[in-house]
Amino acid sequence: MAKAIGVIVSERISAGLVVDHKLVGAMQRFPDDHDEIDGLVELHTEGLVQKICEEVVEAALGGKDIEAVGVALPGLVKEGVVEESPNLPQLKGARMKDMLTAQLRSHGMEAAVTIVNDADAMAAGLASAHGKLDCMIRVWTLGAGIGYGRYPFAPGVWEGGHSVVTLDEKERYCGCGGRGHLEGIMGHRAMRLRFLDMEPEEVFEAAKKGDPRCLEFKRLWHNALAAATATSVHMSGPSKIYLTGVNIHFLDLPMLKNYMRELVKMSPLQSYSLEVVEDLPETRVIGAAISAEQAAAR
Ligand SMILES: [Zn+2]
């Protein structure tokens, strides 16, 4: 039986033991207390590595026979090094794979460590949950930023959240500083910058009541997602596209489908399907473990 540990690092660290693609026992969480939720940003890299290691050891339930450990992080990860991480900036340049491997070894654990992007972990978890480990799937995560995950793993950058969806000079709200990006329209942070007087919830509420400025934005929001999704379909082909994240409740699926129909006209490419799914931490933990197992086998 393949034993692996999946870890996700976002506002908190969550870790779980995954045996044959199923979570065994309860997930470990740090910090437990919701009040300490900003704690991770203040931890320096060594401290964070140590915390992750502690959670992994706890999640292993005393077992030393863990084959693989997968750690999912927000940001651009390449060969175990964090190249960019806007939400955990202290990790930029950190050789996470080497640091964690050494730290785990000092706890008597000789596991193959893999660092993955959190959106890709979500994609692997969804592929497993939906019986699609033999297929190509994609997932958009709508939150503070816009995550684009794909499964199976393929070398590349895949920063789909920064897809250019408009050439409008005024579209400059993306956190990366780029113009016309999907995240600059759909990201929570970007929406707050655009509507300084309204929270995103209020904007979508007002759109329902017919407020012209908010309705126009709601259409732009959906059209931007349709544009980036259509580009993905034109580049990687049709197949399944999942939609999830804390802001998924803003999504009007029929509106998105209507825009998609206008953007994808080649009939062999029209077999894509869109599905809204819940954003469960368990899915990401399982996905991180599966990514690590697959990386260890390569
Ligand atoms: Zn951007």
Image (cartoon, grey):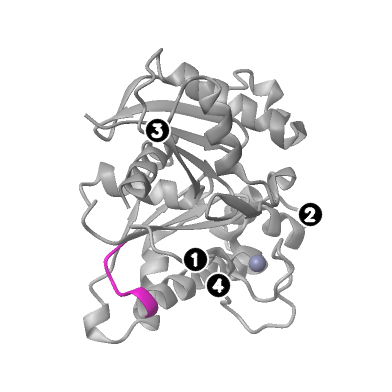
The residue identified by callout 3 is 282
Secondary element under disc 2, as helix, strand or loop, is: loop
The residue identified by callout 2 is 197
Say above or below: 85 vs 184: above
Snapshot quadrant of residue 209 = bottom right
The residue identified by callout 4 is 163
Would residue 54 be counted in the magenta stretch?
no
Q: CA distance from mark 1 to mark 3?
A: 23 Å
Per the rendering, the mark at residue 249 is none
Q: Is residue 157 left or right of residue 279?
A: right
Q: Nearer the viewer, mark 1 or mark 4?
A: 1
Q: Which of the pair 188/2 is nearer the observer?
A: 2
Residue 152: x, y in percent?
Answer: 33, 57
Q: CA distance from mark 2 to mark 4?
A: 27 Å
* Tag 1: amino acid: Trp
Per the rendering, the mark at residue 158 is 1
